[in-house]
Image (cartoon, coloured by chain):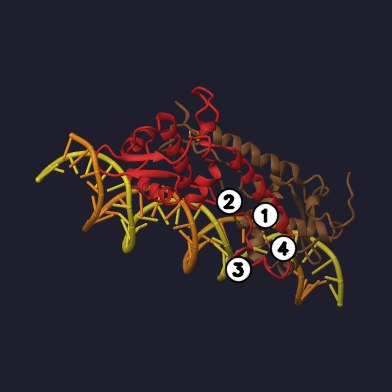
Chain colours: A red, B brown, C yellow, D orange
Amino acid sequence: MKLTSKGRYAVMALADMAQFNNVSPVSLRDISLRQGISLVFLEQIFSKLKKNEIVKSIRGTQGGYVLNGSPSQIKLTKILNAVNEEVKTLQCKKEIKKGCNGKLTKCITHNLWYELEVHINDFFEKKSLQDLIKKNTEQRI
Amino acid sequence: MKLTSKGRYAVMALADMAQFNNVSPVSLRDISLRQGISLVFLEQIFSKLKKNEIVKSIRGTQGGYVLNGSPSQIKLTKILNAVNEEVKTLQCKKEIKKGCNGKLTKCITHNLWYELEVHINDFFEKKSLQDLIKKNTEQRI
DNA sequence: GTATACTTGACTGATTTTGTCGGGTATATA
DNA sequence: TATATACCCGACAAAATCAGTCAAGTATAC
Ligand code: FES
Ligand code: FES
């Protein structure tokens, strides 16, 4: 399980975009300045967000990024998955690890971690960008 | 937020103890063999569990550890806290960090992470060691 | 044609994780 | 009393991951 700066920044940056508007493109430089996040790091993050079709890019002067969909449609699960911050609590998925002999017999805590994974994903699945900017008028689609 | 081997092993080892019995002491060597966890690493972990009064130790031959309380009383929150795997999702607690200017104004995602923290702690607060060994007779106190 | 701003890949320092090593000390049993 | 078992403690280290930087592009508005 992980939740690192990459995931946090992704959510923060997209919330910033959702908050400021989504008509004209928002440049990473603006987000960088407003939220205090390294510009070059943001570029890395947005590259992934674009590949996962969460944002669209517009190149050139006056360019930037726009949200691909309304804030209420964009769930946090999608964002975190896009930047490889999936909530994976199970140790046994990939290969047989010490103390966790995966395929053959499940370890004594296997079910626990699975339940946790579901629990957390539930949370992220219910939250949308819109929920983060509630201070603006409660608009819902 | 973190959930690493140390926390996993702590839960796994305690579940092992709860499962096998809690009358005569269980040696770390046995747990190590049964669960496939490094013995010396277990010693580190149990040192913390003891300091937090989750287990009691009995030295000497035939010694080992016993649970300090019934499995249904020992919640996972307590275990994870003991080995310093508290669920801390907020970035702004300790000091002013980049993109997260703590004390003065909360960042745009502050509330989100706080809600997540509560959500996860709820989960761990509800789960006890007893829940992990349900295959034995459902005894409840 | 020039400044803006997205695009891409490689690389690196710092930190954290996941343990190991080497020495202890207490106690049950022969 | 000798010995083996098993807890106790601190320092150390390899490996992995994180949090970015650096360098070199390409597309577009003006
Ligand atoms: S988490 Fe799946 S076997 Fe341990
Ligand atoms: S998480 Fe508290 S200010 Fe950002």
Tell me: is circle 4 under 8 Å from ligand 1.
yes
For image coordinates 70% across by 50% down, the residue present is: A115
Q: Which residue is mark 3?
A: A95
Element type where label 4 sits in the image: loop
Q: Are marks 3 and 4 in contact (CB under 8 Å)?
A: no
Q: Residues within 10 Å of mark 2 (few under 14, many from 20)?
A: some
Element type where label 1 sits in the image: helix
Query: Between A132 and B112, which is closer to the camera in this rendering?
Result: A132
Mark 3 and mark 2 lie on one chain; the one further toward the N terminus is 2
Q: Which residue is mark 4?
A: A107
Instruction: Report the disc number at residue A87.
Output: 2
Give the chain of mark 1.
B
Q: Are marks 3 and 4 on the same chain?
A: yes
Tell me: is circle 1 under 8 Å from ligand 1.
no
Q: CA distance from mark 4 to mark 1?
A: 23 Å
Q: Residues within 10 Å of mark 4 (few under 14, many from 20)?
A: some
Q: Amino acid at mark 1?
A: Ser
Instruction: Report the disc number at residue A50.
Output: none
Question: Mark 1 or mark 2, which is nearer to you?
Answer: 2
Q: Amino acid at mark 2?
A: Val
Q: Position of residue A141 (x, y in %)?
A: 55, 31
Q: Quadrant of residue B59?
A: bottom right
Instruction: Report the disc number at residue B47.
Output: 1
Q: Is residue C7 left or right of residue B117?
A: left
Mark 3 and mark 4 lie on one chain; the one further toward the N terminus is 3
Q: Is residue B58 visible?
A: no
Q: Position of residue B60 (x, y in %)?
A: 77, 64
